[in-house]
Image (tube, grey):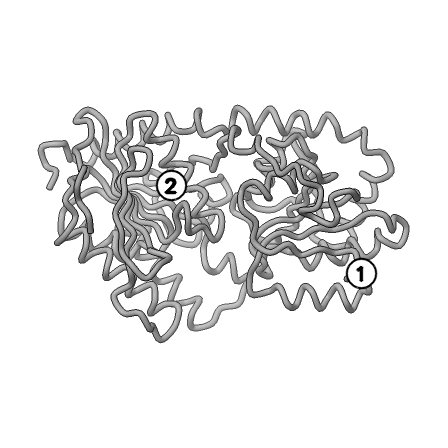
Amino acid sequence: MNKEGVIMGEESNPTVLILTSEYRDNIIGGLGRHVTDLTSVGSKQGINFIVVTSSNTHEESYMIENGIHVFRLLSWQRRPHDFVDHIRNMNFRFVQFVIQELPLSFDLIHVHDWLTGLAGEQIKQILHKPLIATIHATERGRKQGVDNFLTKQITDYESKLIQVSDRVIVCSQFMRTVLQKEFACPIHKLEIIPNGIIPVNYLDIINRKDVFPFKRSKYFLGMGRLVKEKGFQLLIQAFADIHKDYPEIKLVIAGEGPYEDELKELTKNLHIEENVYFTGFVQELARNTLIKNCELVVVPSIYEPFGIIALEGMIASKPVVAFQIGGLTEILKDGRGILVQETTSVSLMECLRDYLTNPKRFQMIAHKGYMAANTTYNWSNLIHRVFEFYTKTVKIEGFSSENKI
């Protein structure tokens, strides 16, 4: 790797080693977007970041990107037996690199979910640095009661990470309760810092009308990873009922994932395949365009610790509809969005039908949502809490710049 240009950070500000499976040019879901935004805004506020992440090419690389040191690494073995084996190999390479090759020093380690927790634990043990873990979601929550060998295996990794971490960040009161009840995490270790957005990132759109064939139509928008817990099957069922009376309305589902084929098959069985559009994964400009032109944003998740897509709808001044579960209850409270109490396609359908009957009634909801996204959930405000949390963790754990490697 090219190590030219590597410099030390400000001595007065914390230097944080970020270990993440997703970052910037390799974003799969909300985790990657969270880490990318956190480091982007944090670096401008004086936090020194070293990011160690996975390479999405056949080579390892090093770059300084907007003041952030980014190392993209390859897994130790290129042909893993399964997903967990791939994660182990990735973590092994992370540990090897940080211990033997990293030319920079740091004050603390920050990992995101169990995916990089294995490396975080090892580096903490070897270098005696404080470890912060952000738990974005839990495997049992994602699997909604399916308790097989893989779920138990990942839950064990999560439990160990929560146990050995000096401090734990969660994105909502819902997740704090989960970690207290299911993992016996002491309350003094837990800190709630919600996910945020960078409003300026949602300004640019694609002006060409031929990009999306449905752009001239009114449409509802669902966006996210296509997995069962995101609830798109309920949205499709609700839309099928609405479409009978409002044939001009379209449904757009943006994202990719293992549940895509089943969702497409469902639209065929309900005879609405001509009116439901699957866009696949979308980059920023396409995402912004879809949100800006939709009637409203639907977040039909049946498990959701937070829900960044809700913030994205809010910052675009769109009404956001979601089931009253998890972190969505907190984001959309106080009239910032529409919370559907029963997690059924029928209840969702009734809510969407209500919107179509009188959409002007939802303008105030959209305005309140915009204000919350632009203040409470704006990364420029949240980053100060992160900065204080980093600094406090280093001081409490007895580490200082003199102890850097």
User: Quadrant of residue 394 in the image?
Assistant: top left
- Residue identified by numbered label 1: 272
- Which residue is found at the position 36% from the left and 67% from the top? 84
Give the x, y percent position of residue 254: 62, 51
232 vs 329: above or below: below
Q: CA distance from mark 2 to mark 1?
A: 42 Å
Mark drawn on residue 169: 2
Give the x, y percent position of residue 192: 42, 36
Q: Amino acid at mark 2?
A: Ile
Q: Amino acid at mark 1?
A: Ile
In the image as oriented, which residue stretches furthest toward the bottom?
A: 81
Q: Are marks 2 and 1 in contact (CB under 8 Å)?
A: no
Q: Is residue 60 left or right of residue 281?
A: left
Which element carries disc 1, helix, strand or loop? loop
Q: Earlier in the sequence, mark 2 or mark 1?
A: 2
Give the x, y percent position of residue 145: 54, 64
Quadrant assignment for the C terminus? top left
Closer to us: 251 or 121: 251
